[in-house]
Amino acid sequence: MNDPFPQPARPTPPTPAPPPPAPADGIDLAPGVKVSASALRLQYARSRGPGGQNVNKVNTKAELWVPLAAIWGLSARAAARLADMAGKRLTSAGDLHIASDSERSQEQNREAVMERLRALVRSAVHEPKARRKSKPSKAARRRRVEAKRRRGEVKSRRRGGGEE
């Protein structure tokens, strides 16, 4: 039998490429999220703030640059949230720039920078709950209207007492 309305063959959708393997030298940022240590760029500079005589001599300020594309294990939505949360810390090249000069030693500032990166990634990975609209129940609406009516009666009794 010939079909008077032949259906065109449906093209098969392309299979998504498998995600790249996790970096071997990966640094954990959040559960399931890593970044390659070779993708991190750390730089040190002279710091302002506390440090006594060392403040003018030692490079204690730590600055970190991480390309967002190098962070492995982020969903597309989490990556978009991370870019949004980064704000002005995101460079035009797509690098996340974090700096710390709050501590007196280079090691402590390096740890502070890494902890700030971890906190930012953890907050980006967390999926915010969608707000569901809610409305008061029938009983709650009835109670509210009843309370308004009682309050109105009290006020109207105050008004109408001047004829004696």
Image (cartoon, grey):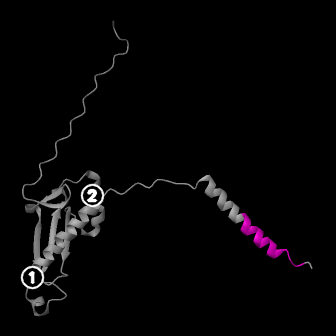
Looking at the rendered structure, which numbered label has been put on residue 125?
A: 2
The answer to which of 133 and 151 lies nearer the viewer is: 151
- Which-is-in-front pick, marks 1 and 2? 2
- Residue at the far bottom in the pictured view: 53
Residue 90 visible somewhere in the drawing: no
In which image quadrant can residue 108 be found? Answer: bottom left
Q: Residue at x 33, y 8 (%)?
A: 2
| CA distance separating discs 1 and 2 | 33 Å
Q: Which kind of residue does numbered mark 2 sit on? A: Val
In the structure shown, which secondary structural element does the residue marked by tag 1 occupy?
loop
Position of residue 45 in the picture relative to residue 154 (left or right): left
Answer above or below: position of 5 versus 19.
above
Q: What percent of the width, then of the height, locates residue 99?
A: 19, 75
Q: Which region shows up in magenta?
A: 149-162
In which image quadrant can residue 6 be found? Answer: top left
Q: Which kind of residue does numbered mark 1 sit on? A: Asn
Q: Quadrant of the C terminus?
A: bottom right
Answer above or below: position of 8 versus 97.
above
